[in-house]
Amino acid sequence: MEFISKRGGDSDYSIIEENKKLKETVFSLKKELNSMKEPPLVVCDVVKMFKEKIIVRLSNGNSFFVNVSPNLIERLNVGDRVLAEQKSLTVVDTIGKSKQFGVENFVIMQKPDISWSEIGGLKNQIRELYEVIELPLKKPKLFKKMGIEPPKGVLLYGASGTGKTVLAKAIAASTNAAFIQIVGSELVQKFIGEGAKLVKDIFKLARENAPAIIFIDEIDSIASERVDIGTSGEREVQRTFMQLLNEIDGFNHLDNVKIIGATNRIDVLDQAIIRPGRLDRLVHIPLPEEKGRSEIFKVHTKNMNIKNIDFREVAALTNSFSGAEIKSVCTEAGYFAIREKRTYIDHKDFLVAINKVRKGDEIDEENPARMFG
Ligand code: ADP
């Protein structure tokens, strides 16, 4: 065995390595896909314990006498928050004492250190965010004196991977604000019955950590126009959305909390969220033009050991690529160079990488299932 692998030399080794990496990727994608198929769990409180069963109370006030997964019952106490399956309400996990069900566990709060120089293109959008978010946070007195009410928040809309999240992070960094990130779909899917409460707690958390920016990614999953709100899931989304509107209406234009919503589905958005006094400043984040693409290439190759790259050509060849795709091109180009055992990355690597990323795109669109094998 050892003899064969030695004879095969380095190229065999790199194929084995690549094979291993691809298998790992397939494995993790399958895992992700399976987790997406899992129905969400219901959050409830333990109100009474018996030998093998317990009584739980749901957030709507109803109580049920339910089963508990094996070996879990000895870890439970009255007053604990537990997770139950939707249909049978069998308790399958615990999240401990009720008061530990804090919002901090479900949002990402950080002080980002992204600087404006890490964003290619988007000059007009950056200027607009500066005026609407940064200036009022930094100089509220100026606005008071002038009698202008700055928007409470903005809505960034555009295709995915165009830089909406990095823009929001950069603005938090330049205002030294806490950055609280939530994903709309998670808010309503992960813990049924808790969406509205989480929204309330998120705004509380923001006020306590002000200046703060609340970034709501995929805001369309909470704030989309619904024709029919008959199902309990839809009612839950509606409740969460109403709470969000209440919270936005409840604070002042000059408070040092700002909201940035992001969506790539502006077409389905409920108009209530963009009414005056709410996220009434809409900023389109487009796919980058050729000049922007060249700048994004420069940003992502800044720390790479590159040789003789014609940035104009790579930008010209990446029409309709998003910033995220350009970033992948740079990483792929690096991999090509590594495979050829070079310590620098040249123009040719970029050309091959561009083709690869473009092809990946085509496969996605034609038949996304193929990605998961
Ligand atoms: P979105 O929130 O619009 O889906 P992100 O902000 O998450 O997109 O961007 C995804 C990745 O693509 C980020 O890691 C970022 O580095 C890169 N990216 C996107 N747009 C740009 C840009 N204009 N300049 C530099 N990098 C970008």
Image (cartoon, rainbow, N blue to C red):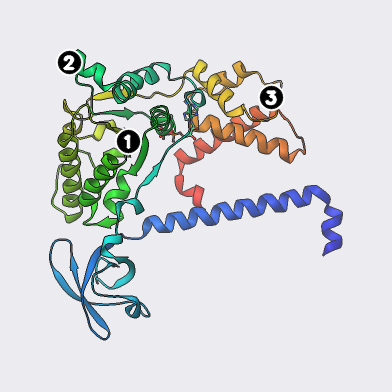
Disc 1, SS: strand
277 lies left or right of 259: left
Q: Identify the residue at horizontal 41%, vertical 33% (top origin).
A: 169
Numbered mark located on residue 212 in the image: 1
Residue furthest to the bottom in view is 51
Amino acid type at image mark 1: Ala
Q: In the displayed structure, would residue 64 be above or below residue 182?
A: below
* Disc 1 to disc 3: CB gap under 8 Å: no
Q: Identify the residue at horizontal 37%, vertical 17% (top origin).
A: 127
Amino acid type at image mark 3: His
Numbered mark located on residue 347 in the image: 3
Amino acid type at image mark 2: Gly
330 lies left or right of 53: right
Give the quarter of the image for residue 5: bottom right
Q: Residues within 10 Å of mark 3 (few under 14, many from 20)?
A: some
Tell whether circle 3 marks a residue whose Cβ is less than 8 angstroms from ligand 1.
Answer: no
Give the image location of residue 215, x and y in percent. Answer: 33, 37
The residue pinned by badge 2 equals: 147
Front one among 333 and 63: 63
Numbered mark located on residue 319 in the image: none
Front one among 39 and 147: 147
Give the image location of residue 330, x and y in percent. Answer: 60, 31
Q: Residues within 10 Å of mark 2 (few under 14, many from 20)?
A: few
- Structural distance between the alpha carbons of marks 1 and 3: 42 Å
Q: In the displayed structure, would residue 249 be above or below residue 204?
A: above
Give the image location of residue 94, x and y in percent. Answer: 33, 68
Disc 3, SS: helix
Please tell me which of labels 3 and 2 falls first in the chain: 2
Please tell me which of labels 1 and 3 falls first in the chain: 1
365 lies left or right of 99: right
Please tell me which of labels 2 and 1 falls first in the chain: 2
